[in-house]
Image: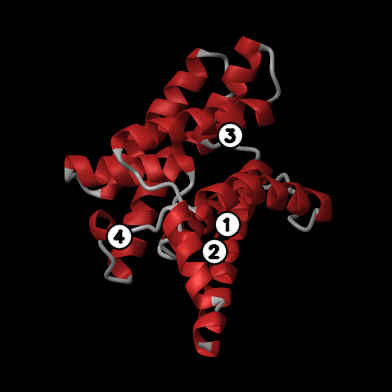
Amino acid sequence: MERKRVEEVKKYLRLLGGLFMCALGCIMILRSDLGLAPWDVLHQGLSKTIGITIGQASIGLGITIVFLDIILGQSIGLGTVINFICVGLFMDLIIFLDFIPVKESYIYRFIILFIGIFFYAYGTFFYMVQGMGCGPRDGFMQILTKKTKYPVVYIKNSIELFALISGWLLGGKVGVGTFATALIMGVFLQYIFRFYKIDLKTLKHRNIKEELIHLKEVLR
């Protein structure tokens, strides 16, 4: 039983590690100053249109997508809730620590951009495979992948491009980094899943009720 508890702690640490990588990737994309990530373009466009902050737009859109995930049959787990809370906190922490240098060199900025995209993709994979529930947007990607049977790269890129175009029409800032993120993120994610020989269509997540029952059994 002690071993199970240790494994459970490790699983939560891996979940948090994946979310931290997502936050780090997002801030690296931001610091490249080559354009906001597609979802952030949409958040900015909503904030300008409705008159709310980007953070409020992100939370509101996240809640909306959670309800859409539920309608489509996607499991909502503790990982979904932790995603809501921690990614924003990690982003604020990384910005506060200010350890990512900003330079004028375009070569440096493109390097930071592509490293950021990779970290974002790897962090997404790393927290998703813990089976504790996806974040709202990644859950939407997974349920569409399952239902349509299309490869994750097509689904991910389609969602990112939809967010990009919608945000741009609403007044969000778009740059070369925005298109790079929209087009490359899904490719990175698909190759990472293939490298670890994990099929996103068969990846299962425990919902909140199942997770609480599981934790109760482990902690006995």
Total label count? 4
Kindly indicate the quadrant of the structure image that contains residue 37: top right
Query: Mark 2 highlights which residue?
Result: 15
Q: Earlier in the sequence, mark 4 or mark 3?
A: 3
Q: Residue furthest left?
A: 149
Question: Mark 2 or mark 1: which is in front?
Answer: 2
Residue 84, given in percent of the width and then of the height, sits at 59, 44
**Which three-letter amino acid code belongs to the residue tagged 3?**
Leu
SS under mark 2: helix
Image quadrant assignment for residue 183: top left
CB atoms at circles 3 and 1 under 8 Å apart? no
The residue under label 3 is 36
Residue to which mark 4 is pinned? 203
Left-right relation of 165 to 111 = left
In whole angstroms, how far apart are the C-alphas of marks 3 and 2? Answer: 25 Å
Residue that label 1 marks: 19
Under circle 1, the secondary element is: helix
Q: Nearer the viewer, mark 3 or mark 2?
A: 2
The CA span between labels 2 and 4 is 15 Å
Query: Measuring 35% from the left and 42% from the top, which residue is drawn there?
Result: 141
Of all residues shown, which one is farthest toward the front? 220
**Kind of residue at disc 1:** Leu
